Image (cartoon, helix red, strand yellow):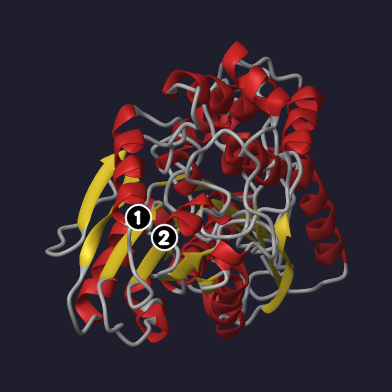
């Protein structure tokens, strides 16, 4: 492997990284492999830094401190009661407190480790993605807090990704254990979020519009940060304040299609179908409105601007991509290879929520699995680096937001005795990226606009 040394790099006894010295060559002479490896590594390091900047820009676009205040309404004549749930709930509550002029009360529930100090809106931390008793109790308190209000009162509902699990209040005849069992089975089945939430709404006393009907005749305004493909308010957090077009029959069909075995009490409730969710046109929802204050599309556009300032042409592949994580990684690798062969300097950006069908006993969320599928399909192609992270800072149930892929990812893994193919088969992408030191550890971001993926293609690298 040889290349031509740039004029700017000529000189006697040049010093490379880590103090290694390389023999000076005249213009046009062949460059030895050690220098070329260093040069490629330096370029990859530049790309790694840019990839992290792209992720940070996407997260910043959905920061409640900036995106929520412009959407606050004028305080009502009566009371203002705040309720809400999600990974951004505490940050949203703090933003409301900071900018609200008037009396304020209420509570929100967020994931453990995602709380913030507040003075007027109580913040409760509970379990996610499988609900616990703390979340159930908080959901019950929120439902009771909005009951008995008058027309002059306002219910301000703050919803973000994670609300479905955090706002868990079993319907009559069901237990928390019933809902936990169904939740775990759906997570393992690879069901997309829309299917999961269809089932959840029909096992809940608060989702699928039931929170809003309990608040009638008060005005209900929901401020939502979307984490779902398509930004459908009825799907975000299982739509506790939004009319539900889905049915018990659809919930049964989803469980059958996914091969999910449910507890007897759940099967009875779904079969009886006697307590359907509020449908579009329900008069109890006449004073319920929803405003999307942050979406995956806005986050991708923010990242695109950063990529363009760095000299890349930004292309957004979509903000609602779904499917098996590893398979999408393979599809995106094909796009990246094509761009590389055409000599294009591109940033391919995408969002959405992939799924992972669990087959092994390894560790790793959907972003790590996507990246390992991408790396295998790229097979070390030079000039291509990538990042994939959940914008909430947690990839699945792990401690990382996601990970990074560089041209030498597979080579470094194999040098450590790792088998990337076997690790992917065992759903252990986390183990591979952890061993390489390529996990992205952001901590909780206190927002959530779903997954963020970026692939940088630079033929010059």
Q: Determine the image quadrant of residue 419.
A: top right
Within-10-Å neighbours for mark 1: few <14, some 14–19, many 20+ = some
Residue 118 drawn at (x, y percent): 16, 62
Residue 407 drawn at (x, y percent): 65, 49
**Residue picked out by circle 2:** 215
Kind of element beneath mark 2: helix
Residue at the image position 12 percent from the left and 64 percent from the top: 119
- Of 90 and 366, the residue lying toward us: 90
Residue 48 drawn at (x, y percent): 51, 59
Residue at the image position 84 percent from the left and 52 percent from the top: 334
Residue 147: which numbered mark, if any?
A: 1
- Vertical placement of 145 versus 349: above or below? above
- Vertical placement of 412 versus 285: above or below? above
> Residue lying furthest left in this view?
119
- Of 332 and 125, the residue lying toward us: 125
Residue at the image position 28 percent from the left and 73 percent from the top: 96
Kind of element beneath mark 1: loop
Quadrant that contains the C terminus = bottom right
Label 2 or label 1, whichever comes before in sequence order: 1
The number of discs equals 2
Q: Are marks 2 and 1 in contact (CB under 8 Å)?
A: yes
- Vertical placement of 362 versus 377: above or below? above
Residue at the image position 54 percent from the left and 78 percent from the top: 302
Q: Determine the image quadrant of residue 399.
A: top left
- Of 125 and 252, the residue lying toward us: 252
């Amino acid at each position: 492997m040889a290349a031509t040394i740039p004029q700017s790099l000529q000189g006697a006894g040049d010093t490379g990284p880590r103090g290694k010295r390389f023999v000076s060559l005249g213009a046009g002479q062949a460059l030895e492999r050690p220098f070329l490896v260093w040069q490629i590594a330096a370029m990859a390091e530049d790309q790694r830094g840019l990839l992290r900047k792209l992720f940070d820009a996407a997260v910043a676009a959905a920061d409640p401190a900036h995106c929520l205040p412009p959407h606050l309404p004028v305080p009502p004549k009566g009371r203002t009661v705040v309720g809400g749930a999600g990974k951004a709930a505490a940050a949203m509550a703090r933003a409301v407190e900071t900018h609200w002029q008037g009396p304020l009360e209420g509570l929100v529930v967020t994931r453990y480790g995602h709380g913030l100090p507040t003075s007027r809106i109580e913040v409760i931390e509970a379990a996610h993605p499988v609900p616990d008793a703390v979340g159930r109790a908080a959901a019950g308190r929120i439902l009771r807090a909005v009951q008995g209000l008058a027309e002059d009162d306002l219910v301000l509902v703050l919803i973000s990704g994670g609300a479905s699990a955090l706002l868990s209040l079993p319907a009559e005849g069901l237990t928390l254990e019933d809902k936990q069992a169904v939740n775990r089975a759906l997570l393992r089945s690879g069901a997309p979020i829309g299917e999961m939430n269809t089932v959840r709404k029909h096992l809940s006393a608060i989702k699928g519009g039931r929170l809003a009907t309990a608040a009638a005749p008060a005005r209900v305004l929901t401020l939502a940060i979307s984490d779902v493909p398509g930004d459908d308010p009825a799907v975000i957090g299982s739509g506790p304040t939004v009319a539900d077009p889905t049915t018990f029959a659809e919930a049964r069909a989803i469980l059958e299609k996914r091969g999910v075995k449910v507890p007897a009490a759940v099967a009875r409730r779904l079969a009886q179908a006697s307590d359907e969710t509020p449908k579009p046109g329900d008069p109890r929802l006449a004073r319920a409105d929803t405003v999307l204050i942050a979406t995956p599309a806005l986050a991708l556009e923010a990242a695109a601007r950063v990529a363009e300032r760095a000299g890349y042409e930004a292309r957004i592949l979509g903000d609602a991509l779904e499917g098996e994580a590893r398979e999408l990684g393979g599809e995106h690798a094909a796009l990246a290879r094509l761009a590389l062969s055409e000599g294009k300097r591109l940033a391919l950006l995408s969002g959405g929520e992939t799924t992972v069908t669990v087959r092994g006993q390894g560790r790793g969320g959907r972003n790590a699995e996507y990246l390992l599928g991408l790396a295998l399909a790229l097979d070390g192609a030079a000039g291509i680096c990538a990042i994939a992270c959940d914008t909430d800072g947690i990839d699945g149930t792990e401690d990382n937001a996601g990970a990074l892929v560089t041209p030498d990812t597979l080579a470094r893994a194999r040098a450590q005795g790792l088998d990337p193919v076997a690790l992917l088969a065992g759903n252990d992408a986390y183990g591979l990226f952890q061993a390489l030191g390529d996990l992205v550890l952001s901590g909780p971001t206190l927002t959530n606009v779903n997954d963020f993926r970026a692939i940088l293609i630079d033929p010059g690298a």
